[in-house]
Image (cartoon, rainbow, N blue to C red):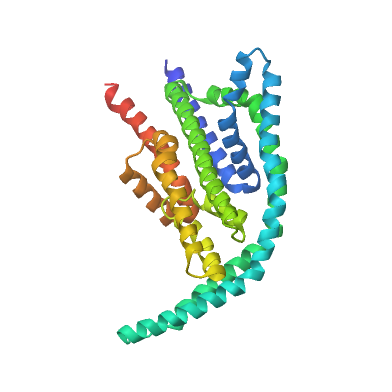
């Protein structure tokens, strides 16, 4: 009996050391851990299709290959069609920026004159100068970093499919290895929590992807119909920034606002553009989000706001994006600890 208790304590210590080493390795090896996490999230999203195909009579290996090839096609085909247009628009942006800068500078002077006329207060030039300098330096940094981004993307294009295939084929084996290392005293809770966390994270990422895609498609289509420059780039920007809670829709609308003002000024085109963004985000807030995201997260709105604020304070934009699923996961863990500690008595 004493030997059994000592053995269980040893397994418990070894298990937590193993988890700690795994987390340390993930943090210390980002070139491996990032594509590994991307492929794992993709695995959580698409894996349910494997047992579905197996129920139709297909073998495990054939089901995995079909799911894997289908996902590759769904990812690669749009990328091949969209990337050339996107690259062309991105290259033209740098030649269009001076026009936007001139427009903003001229109108800021008008605002200065208006404010001074009404209040006798002179707005400092430093505000505009610093803002323009910040935007230009940020844009230059992004453009100069394109080769690095492309190199990382090419590396990901090799690693993510490789990791994803082995997750689909051997995911159950990997899971069994971890479960075999789990001490008996926490086995049931660990198994339940891992299952729930995997499901919540997979469902949340998929829901956010669908949500961002819907917003991006609506805005891209609307901008193309209105024949506005950089429609695809602006639409993708709106979709990607929509992932950021609360401030994302506003950030996504600013580039389109500047382009339309510089190109068309104040008029019907600007009104139509603003109406398009309002409609797209209204569909997201009142239809897509309640159906797809809120039910998965299952968090009180106050907790969502607090988690986003804390995430942004400590980890910036990335923290804002991951704060909600992390808060949902933390809630799940706290509930399990509470039930284990109090309701088990």
Tell which residue pokes out farthest to the top in this image: 57
Name the residue nearer the viewer: 246 or 106.
106
Residue at 67% across, 43% down: 78
Name the residue nearer the viewer: 114 or 143.
114
Considering the image in quadrants, where does the C terminus appear?
top left
Q: At which x and y percent is residue 156?
A: 68, 45
Query: Could you tell whether 216 is left or right of 9 in the image?
Result: right
Q: At which x and y percent is residue 120?
A: 32, 87
Q: Is residue 6 above or below residue 103?
A: above
Q: At which x and y percent is residue 74?
A: 66, 36
Q: Is residue 174 above or below residue 265?
A: above
Q: At which x and y percent is residue 228?
A: 59, 60
Query: Could you tell whether 302 is left or right of 247 in the image?
Result: left
Q: Quadrant of residue 283?
A: top left
Name the residue nearer the viewer: 199 or 240.
240
Residue at 54% across, 65% down: 260
Residue at 59% across, 30% down: 46
């Amino acid at each position: 009996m004493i030997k059994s208790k000592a053995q269980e304590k040893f397994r418990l210590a070894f298990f937590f050391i193993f988890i700690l080493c795994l987390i340390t390795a993930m943090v210390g090896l980002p070139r491996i851990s990032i594509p590994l996490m991307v492929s794992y999230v993709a695995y959580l999203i698409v894996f349910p299709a494997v047992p579905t195909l197996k129920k139709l009579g297909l073998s495990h290996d054939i089901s995995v290959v079909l799911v894997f090839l289908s996902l590759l096609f769904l990812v690669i085909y749009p990328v091949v069609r969209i990337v050339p247009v996107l690259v062309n628009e991105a290259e033209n942006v740098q030649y269009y920026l001076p026009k936007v800068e001139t427009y903003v500078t001229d109108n800021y002077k008008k605002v200065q004159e208006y404010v001074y006329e009404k209040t006798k207060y002179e707005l400092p030039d430093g505000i505009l100068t610093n803002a323009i300098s910040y935007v230009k330096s940020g844009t230059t940094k992004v453009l100069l970093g394109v080769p690095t981004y492309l190199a990382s993307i090419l590396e990901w294009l090799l690693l993510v499919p490789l990791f994803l295939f082995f997750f689909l084929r051997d995911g159950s084996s990997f899971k069994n290895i971890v479960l075999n290392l789990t001490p008996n005293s926490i086995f049931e809770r660990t198994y339940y929590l891992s299952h729930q966390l995997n499901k919540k994270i997979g469902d949340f990422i998929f829901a956010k992807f669908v949500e961002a895609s819907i917003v991006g498609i609506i805005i891209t289509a609307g901008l193309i119909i209105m024949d506005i420059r950089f429609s695809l780039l602006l639409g993708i920007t709106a979709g990607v920034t929509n992932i950021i809670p609360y401030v994302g829709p506003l950030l996504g609308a600013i580039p389109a606002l500047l382009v339309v003002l510089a190109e068309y000024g104040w008029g019907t085109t600007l009104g139509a553009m603003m109406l398009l963004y309002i409609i797209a985000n209204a569909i997201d807030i009142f239809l897509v989000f309640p159906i797809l995201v809120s039910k998965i997260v299952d968090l009180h709105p106050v907790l969502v706001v607090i988690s986003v604020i804390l995430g942004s304070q400590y980890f910036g934009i990335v923290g804002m994006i991951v704060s909600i699923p992390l808060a949902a996961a933390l809630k799940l863990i706290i509930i399990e600890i509470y039930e284990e500690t109090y309701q088990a008595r």
